[in-house]
Image: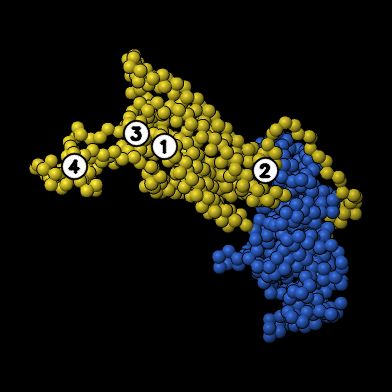
């Protein structure tokens, strides 16, 4: 028995001194950051490449939009300028919708596989038995993925903001900046939303431990969260109200709002200052008489000027950051539950 | 020398406990998944510098035990310490390497990347040792891990485990799925490193026959807890394999063959016209029985088949203050 072992042990000498690797130079990633970068570099490079291309394209097109809108506003447009502006409004919707989908993409294709891939293949164990802690592993993975996600959302959001600005100032009624495809795809809100997508995906991956189911559940979860956010978004808007009086409530008597403002709500104004919906008396035979009888004396329009956009962005981003932190608590619980 | 504990009737034979360094100590370690206990009341010590085989039936909790020691899981109850540090602590993790049964590696990494991972995540990493271990297996450093054979992947996984320069290596079925030649090469390479550095090894395996050549220490666990623990030589030497002609032996009312009352019968079986029994002798062997030294495989299989046999725990595997304590 044990002949091999015993013989080997008889011949054992002093333990070898560890031999160090060749010295490293430059600012290459080290430690856990190196591992995360090496493991996910294809994903991060695709994100980086897509961000650079999309940002450059939006900025390039934005230059032409700025020039065309300036020409139209200056009263000396060429036919090409009019066409450019008209096309830009259509394109803005498409670009905004694409960027509003970024949290879904990041959640499903970056967040969900972040840990589910390692749990599925067993490499979570491989990393877990090295000298570095698993807390560091989880934190580094999330931090590096968050950095690239935030960079993507921030850069593309800024470029879209640049592209959109002249269009809003020219005619905000065609570029509603309070809608999901505009509000959620620019500024700090875009960054926080993409981080929420990442964290939801990572959490689902930790809990489900399988890539494909995690991706599907992440998409469903983000759809539900997005629906809730749709209902909550306008709560962060600070609105202005403009009214008319004197018994003038015809369609032509509606108050005008600034051209860079978005109309949020339209109501009739009664003499006692109360509001009634614009559909009041819509089925009456004599509408004006019906409205007068109801005490209506004019219009009231709630609107949001573009100048309030920034404040709404930061307020909403702060609230979403609270949600992000709550999800982070769930992520920490999921990591603790799954990895020990 | 025969000792009997006052609490559990555990029979203990062997030398007195020595003060050897303890690599690993488990105290009433248990892990539950939902309502199912995967591991229960695991209690033992493993002296440092041993190559220890860990055997037990499927579901006995060997993998769970190794994962707790490696810091991958928290125990539901009890505790495990590695060289005195709680399992899973930074100090313990730095001293332990674990090779899971599936030998997970990043398949898109090259071999060099895999070794770099070890270097980046372990302060005491020995790059030359790891590279030498890989090259000895004729594996190119620029080869993709995903393109390697099972044996080559095992070698890479072992290189990562050894390059960390651990004091305790945990191996979960390291030789499973390897062909005999690769198994022999892998074992040879592993034991050479282990011997050179005096590393403690705890290795679970179903290949009982091979443990005899690999291990100098053995732990056998069953659902009922630890059944065997001690030096392989010692465990074999305290057993005898008795055999007799079937006609010459009648069975006692409890089913055990007559004439073995003086011994502790681990397992007895009647096959055709032959009766055999693995016993721990309590006196001279008398006619019609003849005695022979068993192999380690015979001892292990007897304890595995007879899960409720009296435990045989070497003094240096005892954890003071637990149910298997040695009585004076």
Image quadrant in which you'd find residue B233 = bottom right
Any mark on residue A32, and which? 2
Any mark on residue B225, and which? none
Nearest to N terminus: mark 3 or mark 4: 3
Nearest to N terminus: mark 4 or mark 1: 4
Same subunit, labels 4 and 2: the answer reads yes
Q: Nearer the viewer, mark 4 or mark 2?
A: 4
Above or below, A227 against A161 in this view is: below
Q: Nearer the viewer, mark 4 or mark 1?
A: 4
The structure residue drawn at horizontal position 83% and vertical position 74%, both measured from the top left corner, is B13
Residue B59 place in picture, x, y as percent = 63, 64
The residue that disc 3 covers is: A261
Above or below, B72 against A253 in this view is: below
- What colour denotes chain A? yellow
Any mark on residue A309, and which? 1
Residue A10 place in picture, x, y as percent = 90, 54
Any mark on residue A297, and which? 4
Question: In the depicted view, which residue is nearer to us: A327 or A42?
Answer: A327
Same subunit, labels 4 and 1: the answer reads yes
Q: Could you tell whether B314 is left or right of A269 in the image?
A: right
Rendered-image quadrant of the N terminus of chain A: bottom right
- What colour denotes chain B? blue
Nearest to N terminus: mark 3 or mark 1: 3
């Amino acid at each position: 028995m044990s002949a091999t072992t015993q013989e080997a042990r008889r011949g054992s000498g002093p333990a070898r001194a560890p031999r160090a690797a060749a010295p490293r130079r430059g600012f290459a990633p080290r430690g856990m950051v190196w591992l995360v970068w090496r493991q996910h570099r294809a994903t991060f490079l695709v994100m980086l490449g897509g961000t650079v291309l999309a940002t450059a394209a939006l900025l390039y097109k934005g230059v032409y939009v700025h020039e065309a809108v300036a020409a139209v506003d200056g009263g000396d447009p060429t036919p090409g300028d009019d066409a450019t502006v008209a096309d830009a409004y259509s394109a803005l919707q498409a670009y905004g919708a694409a960027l509003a989908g970024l949290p879904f993409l990041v959640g499903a294709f970056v967040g969900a596989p972040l840990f589910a891939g390692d749990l599925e293949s067993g490499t979570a164990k491989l990393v877990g038995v090295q000298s570095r802690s698993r807390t560091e592993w989880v934190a580094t993975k999330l931090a590096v993925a968050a950095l690239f996600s935030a960079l993507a959302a921030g850069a593309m959001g800024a470029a879209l903001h640049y592209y959109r600005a002249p269009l809003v100032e020219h005619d905000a009624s065609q570029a509603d900046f309070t809608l999901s495809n505009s509000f959620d795809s620019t500024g700090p809100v875009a960054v926080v939303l993409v981080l929420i997508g990442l964290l939801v995906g990572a959490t689902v991956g930790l809990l489900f431990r399988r890539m494909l189911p995690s991706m599907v559940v992440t998409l469903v979860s983000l759809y539900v969260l997005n629906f809730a956010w749709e209902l909550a978004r306008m709560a962060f808007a600070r609105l202005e109200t403009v009214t008319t009086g004197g018994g003038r409530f015809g369609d032509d008597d509606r108050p005008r709002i600034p051209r860079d403002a978005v109309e949020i709500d339209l109501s009739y104004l009664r003499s006692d200052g109360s509001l009634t919906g614009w559909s009041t008396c819509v089925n009456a035979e004599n509408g004006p008489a019906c409205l007068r009888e109801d005490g209506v004396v004019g219009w009231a329009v709630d609107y949001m000027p573009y100048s309030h956009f920034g404040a709404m962005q930061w307020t909403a981003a702060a609230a979403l950051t609270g949600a992000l932190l709550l999800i982070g608590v769930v992520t920490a619980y999921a990591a603790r539950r799954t990895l020990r | 020398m025969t000792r009997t504990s006052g609490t559990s009737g555990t029979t203990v034979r062997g030398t007195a406990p020595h003060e050897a360094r303890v690599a690993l100590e488990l105290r009433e370690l248990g892990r539950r998944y939902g309502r199912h206990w995967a591991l229960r009341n695991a209690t033992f010590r493993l002296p440092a510098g041993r190559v220890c085989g860990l055997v037990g039936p499927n579901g006995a909790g060997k993998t769970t035990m190794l994962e707790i020691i490696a810091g991958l899981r928290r125990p539901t109850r009890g505790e495990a310490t590695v060289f005195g540090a709680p399992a899973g602590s930074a100090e313990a993790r730095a001293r332990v390497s674990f090779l899971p049964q599936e030998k997970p590696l990043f398949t898109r990494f090259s071999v060099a990347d895999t070794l770099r991972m070890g270097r980046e995540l372990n302060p005491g990493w020995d790059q030359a040792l790891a590279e030498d271990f890989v090259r000895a297996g004729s594996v190119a450093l620029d080869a993709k891990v995903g393109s390697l054979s099972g044996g080559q992947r095992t070698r890479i996984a072992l290189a990562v485990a050894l390059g960390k320069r651990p004091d305790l290596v945990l191996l979960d079925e390291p030789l499973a799925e390897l062909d005999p030649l690769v198994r022999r090469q892998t074992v040879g390479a592993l034991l050479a490193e282990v011997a050179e550095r005096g590393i403690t090894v705890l290795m679970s395996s179903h290949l009982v026959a091979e443990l005899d050549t690999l291990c100098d220490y053995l732990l056998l666990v069953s659902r009922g807890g630890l059944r065997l623990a001690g030096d392989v030589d010692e465990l074999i030497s305290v057993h005898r394999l008795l055999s007799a002609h079937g006609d010459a032996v009648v069975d006692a009312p409890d089913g055990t063959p007559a004439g073995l009352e003086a011994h502790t019968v681990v397992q007895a079986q009647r096959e055709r016209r032959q009766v055999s029994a693995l016993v721990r002798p309590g006196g001279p062997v008398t006619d019609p029985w003849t005695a022979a030294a068993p192999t380690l495989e015979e001892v292990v299989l007897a304890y595995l088949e007879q899960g409720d046999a009296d435990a045989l725990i070497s003094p240096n595997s005892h954890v003071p203050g637990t149910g298997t304590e040695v009585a004076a």
